[in-house]
Amino acid sequence: MERRREKIMRGIGACALVMTVTGCVETAPEIAISEPDPELNFVRGYRNAADECQLVGETPFTVDFLDDATDLVACPTDSAGMASLMAETGAQIITQTNSFSFFSIPYR
């Protein structure tokens, strides 16, 4: 009986640990819009001239996301460039369109 109780308690502890760890993982919100992509003002590649992630300037769509202490960057959604930007900067998606995911990246 004691061994059975010990096994049950270990199982409960393991479940609690898994639930705690998985509860801490942030996932990107599903906020894509189903309308055509808005007009965007791409300034240049963000990390280099050939970067598929682009620094974005002001347009009616982006005006609410611009900040004087951050760069607004758009990457093609689910692209390799987007994955590497997120890995390198820890940036989270702030909004999406049909084709692009947007990130607000603080100046270093």
Image (cartoon, rainbow, N blue to C red):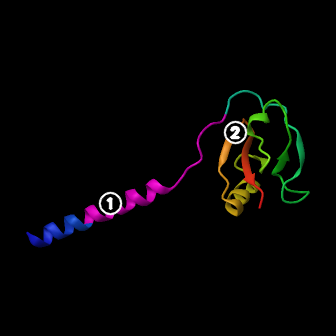
Q: Residue at x 67, y 31 (%)?
A: 33
**In this image, 31 relative to 11: left or right?**
right
Q: Which residue is mark 1?
A: 15
Disc 2 element: strand
Mark 2 is surrounded, within 10 Å at the Cα level, by few (under 14), some (14 to 19) or many (20 or more) other residues, namely many
Of the two numbered discs 1 and 2 on the same chain, state the one appearing first in sequence.
Answer: 1
Give residue 104's position: percent from left, percent from top. Answer: 73, 48
Residues shaded magenta: 11-32
Q: Is residue 16 magenta?
A: yes
Give residue 18's position: percent from left, percent from top. Answer: 39, 60
Disc 1 element: helix
Q: Quadrant of the N terminus?
A: bottom left
Q: Is residue 68 magenta?
A: no
In front here: 34 or 47? Answer: 47
Give residue 107's position: percent from left, percent from top. Answer: 78, 57
Furthest residue in direction front, as rendered: 68
Q: Which residue is mark 2?
A: 96
Furthest residue in direction left, as rendered: 1
Looking at the image, residue 57 lies above or below residue 7: above
Do callouts 1 and 2 mark residues in contact (Cβ within 8 Å)? no
Three-letter amino acid code at the position of disc 2? Gln
Q: Residue at x 74, y 39 (%)?
A: 65
Looking at the image, residue 31 lies above or below residue 26: above
Three-letter amino acid code at the position of disc 1? Cys
Using the numbered discs, state the Cα–Cα distance from disc 1 to disc 2 in whole angstroms.
34 Å
Looking at the image, residue 30 lies above or below residue 51: above
Give residue 29's position: percent from left, percent from top. Answer: 58, 42
Mark 1 is surrounded, within 10 Å at the Cα level, by few (under 14), some (14 to 19) or many (20 or more) other residues, namely few
Furthest residue in direction top, as rendered: 35
Q: Residue at x 18, y 70 (%)?
A: 6
> Which corner quadrant of the image does residue 59 belong to?
top right
Q: Residue at x 78, y 48 (%)?
A: 73
